Image (tube, rainbow, N blue to C red):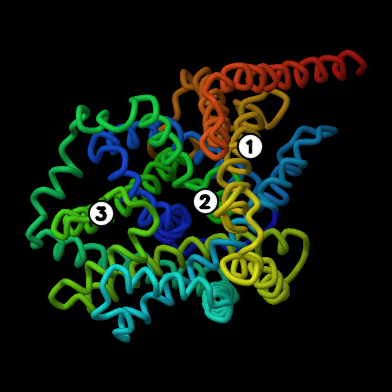
Amino acid sequence: MNSREKFSSRIGFLLISAGCAVGLGNVWRFPYITGQYGGAAFVIIYLFFLALLGLPIMTMEFSVGRASQRSAAKSFELLEPKGTKWHWIKIIPLIGNYMLMMFYTTVGGWMIAYFFKMASGELANSNAAGVNNAFNAFLADPFQQVLWMIVVTLIGFLICSRGLKNGVEKISKYLMNALFVIMLVLAIHSFFLSGAKEGLSFYLIPDFQRALEKYSLGTIIFEALGQAFFTLSLGIGALAIFGSYIDKEHSLVSESINVVILDTIVALVSGLIIFPACFTFDIDAGSGPGLIFVTLPTTFNAMSGGQIWGSLFFVFLAFAALTTIIAVFENIIAFAMDYGWSRQKAVIINLILVMVLSLPCAFGFNLLQHIQPLGIGTTIQDLEDFIVTNNLLPLGSLMYLLFCTSRYGWGWQNYIKEVNSGKGLKLPSIAKFYISYILPLIVILILFEGYMEKFDLPFSLIIPCFFLIYVAYILIQASLIKRKKEKLTDH
């Protein structure tokens, strides 16, 4: 086992792992999708699936990382049985982390840009139409898109260049602590808005009848399921690297629960910030992504001290984006270091590579806007997001499930031993059937639901496709068993 950097403290591990999970999916997507699908009723279903789905897969990523003491680029090679080809799984994390950054750096740049726009008063005194025109003009300007993408990429790699303890861990602690403080200040401010009572009631008091007025229960469940899965960015090994930086003092069930709790707190508090404002200023809480860049800036303009509150809000969003970017950059750097590169070489090469790979997304709103890969009105960012979110995350999660539960992969016994090493909560052996056979069903369901939603496919297609993929999953398990028996017989 190689000697490698370690976190200086447990809180460092928890905060940076949470920082990786905490991203724009929490503070951008979660509030508007909650508003769209019925408020508190949606939140309850979401929390249920977060525990049922996200937690077990997170323990697998941490377990593979801690047992191998490597990133996803090398972990499967070290843990796989001799003569097997499990190491091909690493293709998904390798592609997934780079492709995630190909569009996340651009969107992260938007947050920093909008902090300066709010702080400078550039958006002050603009009505909704003016703010909307300003956002469209911002997207149409290739210089600004590339500039802010470069800024956020440079910040992220500069922090990672200082090493695990002095860079990634230290700065992530400051960012996450600042994030929590800003969230608390913004939430308290929202409590004193005139529409706070109605907004908090909508957000915190379940009303399933109201939730079912627009959408079926099945649709709401699917959306809650997808949000619970995607919010943690599971399946591309983004969290596995941090498992490799910790010791065996605490069980990975306990550590995973703590990370999920921190991630959930950020998502829930972001709702406490946004919904009182929506009800105060008669804003549709389910108005989609434009809620952040059009609706809320208009709202801040109408508030007393709105320039200050708006600036704080975009600092909050920028920190949420940066924590994810820093964590994924560390993962990308670790890939290269596992193949013998120095940290500085990995930083320099990947800094240039990520900037170049991010250009199509940055130009997709202006110079390359004629490229509409998923239909009229779509952008290159939509395609990159679709590949990561609807393909690599669920496929990667399936591979982790197969690797950790198959007797001829790493295997259940090795996984359960690793995940339960240390003090804290343990994963009971009774969970084996659920994790091995039921959880893959849920992930496959998410995979197909993503295609149905994206391409407006009829629901009737999901049953045969879903059945075929699940049968294929079971056959892979069976073929691995058969192959191992044949090898034993030959010997």
* Precedes in sequence: disc 2 or disc 1: 2
Say what secondary structure mark 2 lies in.
loop
Specify the label residue 269 is tagged with: 3
Looking at the image, the residue that sits furthest to the bottom is 120
Query: Marks 1 and 3: in contact by CB < 8 Å?
Result: no
* CA neighbours of label 2 inside 10 A, class few (<14), some (14 to 19), many (20+): some
**Which tag is nearer the camera, tag 3 or tag 2?**
3
Please name the residue shown 69% across and 45% down the image: 92
x, y percent for residue 300: 22, 71
Which residue position is annotated with label 2? 247
Q: In terms of depth relative to the viewer, which is nearer, 424 or 16?
A: 16
Which residue type carries mark 1?
Leu
Which residue position is annotated with label 1? 395
Say what secondary structure mark 3 lies in.
helix
Judge whether residue 367 can be spotted in this image. yes
x, y percent for residue 84: 81, 32
x, y percent for residue 236: 61, 47
